[in-house]
Amino acid sequence: MMEIQRTVNPMNTLQKPRKREERHVTSFLEIVDVGTGERHVLAEFDDLIEAPNWTSDGESLIYNRSGLLYTYEIATGQSTVINSDYADWCNNDHVLSPDNSQIAVSHHTEEDGQSRIYVLPLAGGQPTLITAMAPSYLHGWSPDGRELSYCAERNGVYNIYTIPV
C-alpha cells in the first residue's frame, strides 16, 4: 500500500484552512455628514456587507458582500457586482489604486482557504496574484501606486510588509 505524505509549507504555521461561513445579520450602507452628524441610509441588506470605500470622484462606493465586490452608484442607488473572475472569496481587505483604475483584494483561495493578495481592474477582469505566500492580508496602496502594504504570517510571526504591484 502506498502512503501519501502531506507536505506543510514551513512559512505558514496555520494548521486548518479557513472555511466559508454564513453570518445572519442585517447591514446598512450609509453615509454620514461629519460636520452635522446627519446620517443617510443608502441601502439595507439581509446579510453582511463590509468595508465601503469611496471612489475618488465621489460617485460610487465599493463594498464587499459574501466574498464578492460591488459598486454602489450614489446617483441611481443601484449596486452591481464587479467581475472578479475566480476571486470570489474576498474578505473586507480591499483598497483602490490612487488613480482608481485598479482594486487590490485579499482573497481566500479554494485550494487551501488561505488569504492571498490580488489586483484586478476596478471595471472588472482577471485578478493578478501579488503574494504567493499565505496568509497575506492587504492594508494599503502607496500614494504613488507602486507598492502595497500588508500584514502576513511568516514562520509563525506576523509582521508588516510592502511589495511592488
Image (cartoon, rainbow, N blue to C red):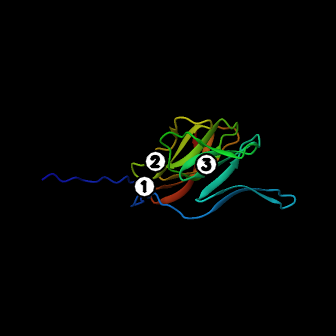
Along the polypeptide, which appears first: circle 1 or circle 3? 1
- Tell me the kind of residue under disc 3: His
Q: Work out whether residue 87 or residue 149 is closer to the camera in this orientation and state it.
A: 87
Do the numbered discs 1 and 2 sit on residues whose CB atoms are within 8 Å?
A: yes
- Tell me the kind of residue under disc 2: Met
Residue 139 in view here: no
Q: Please give the name of the residue rendered at 41% of the width and 59% of the height, measured from the top-left corner.
A: 13
Q: Position of residue 130 (x, y in %)?
A: 52, 41
Tell me the crowding category of disc 1: few under 14, some 14 to 19, or many 20 or more residues within 10 angstroms, Cα based.
Answer: some
Do the numbered discs 3 and 2 sit on residues whose CB atoms are within 8 Å?
A: no
Q: Is residue 59 left or right of residue 90?
A: right
- Tell me the kind of residue under disc 1: Asn
**Is residue 28 shown above or below 138?**
below
Instruction: Work out how far the residue at label 1 is from the one at label 3, CA to CA, in angstroms.
Output: 22 Å
The residue at which mark 2 appears reads as: 133
Q: Is residue 30 left or right of residue 27?
A: right
Q: Position of residue 46 (x, y in %)?
A: 60, 59
Q: Position of residue 146 (x, y in %)?
A: 63, 37
Do the numbered discs 1 and 3 sit on residues whose CB atoms are within 8 Å?
A: no
